[in-house]
Image: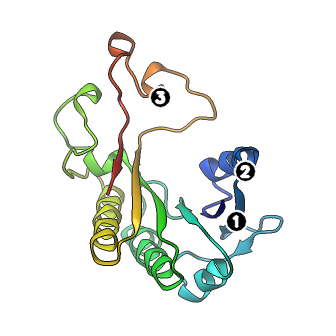
Amino acid sequence: MNVLLTGAAGRIGTMLRERLPDYGVALRLFDREPLAGGIVGDVADAAALDEAFTGELDAVVHLAGQPTEAPWTRVREDNIEGAYQLFEAARRHGVGRVVYASSNHAVGFTPRGFEDLHPDTPPRPDTLYGVSKVFGEALARYYVERYGLQVACLRIGAFRDKPTAALMRGSSPSTTSRSRCSTRRC
């Protein structure tokens, strides 16, 4: 499987770069930061994405963007314009599968505990960063409905190389029998 990995120099991108090839995944790397064998570019730049999408690709894992709350101009350019350009490039180049990195901040104002959050929890963003992730999820839904893309939106809550608490493994100590996955198909 040939996969374009945007945000390949980030924390999650680095972990995936190191592990996915062991599962037979051939990665094409894309980031603002130079990486050996990678393509340097900005995810909001359509021409840079066209270069990254050249050749055979089966899927995209989209991790690029502003990963935390930041001034609106930064969030807008990296996460809103970047998501739009990414989905458009996938559509233009016929890459029908996208994994979109969303965030728990898309539902951060939901008034309940982690154990009550379900994959279909409606948007209640707690930051402008969260608003940008809600936009990305809505954009993904549009590309699913309009163009038939297959998209998985992952509402990431925390990331470490290895989980440091039960919550980070997707379960709480008292309710390990029920899944706590906050992955949702857009």
Q: Which of marks 2 and 1 is nearer the N terminus?
A: 2
Q: Earlier in the sequence, mark 3 or mark 1?
A: 1
Residue 158 or residue 30, whichever sits in front:
30
Give, as a three-letter code, the residue at label 1.
Leu
Q: What residue lies at 51% left-to-right and 64% top-to-bottom?
A: 65
Q: Which mark is residue 24?
A: 2
Give, as a three-letter code, the residue at label 3.
Met
Q: Which mark is residue 29?
A: 1
- Residue placed under numbered mark 3 in the picture: 168
Q: Is residue 162 left or right of residue 124?
A: right
Distance (Cα) linking label 2 and label 1: 15 Å
Quadrant containing the C terminus in the rendered view: bottom left
Farthest residue in the bottom direction? 47
The number of callouts visible is 3
Quadrant containing the N terminus in the rendered view: bottom right
Q: Position of residue 114 (x, y in %)?
A: 29, 29
The quarter holding residue 132 reads bottom left
Farthest residue in the right direction? 36
Q: Position of residue 100 (x, y in %)?
A: 45, 59
Q: What residue lies at 72% left-to-right and 74% top-to-bottom?
A: 39
Give, as a three-letter code, the residue at label 2.
Gly
Q: What residue lies at 60% left-to-right and 48% top-to-bottom?
A: 12
- In the figure, 15 relative to 52: above or below? above
Q: Position of residue 167 (x, y in %)?
A: 42, 24
Q: What residue lies at 25% left-to-right and 37% top-to-bottom?
A: 118
Q: In this view, does 94 lie to the left or right of 148?
A: right
Viewer-side label of 2, 3: 2
Distance (Cα) linking label 3 and label 1: 26 Å
SS for callout 1: strand
SS for callout 3: helix
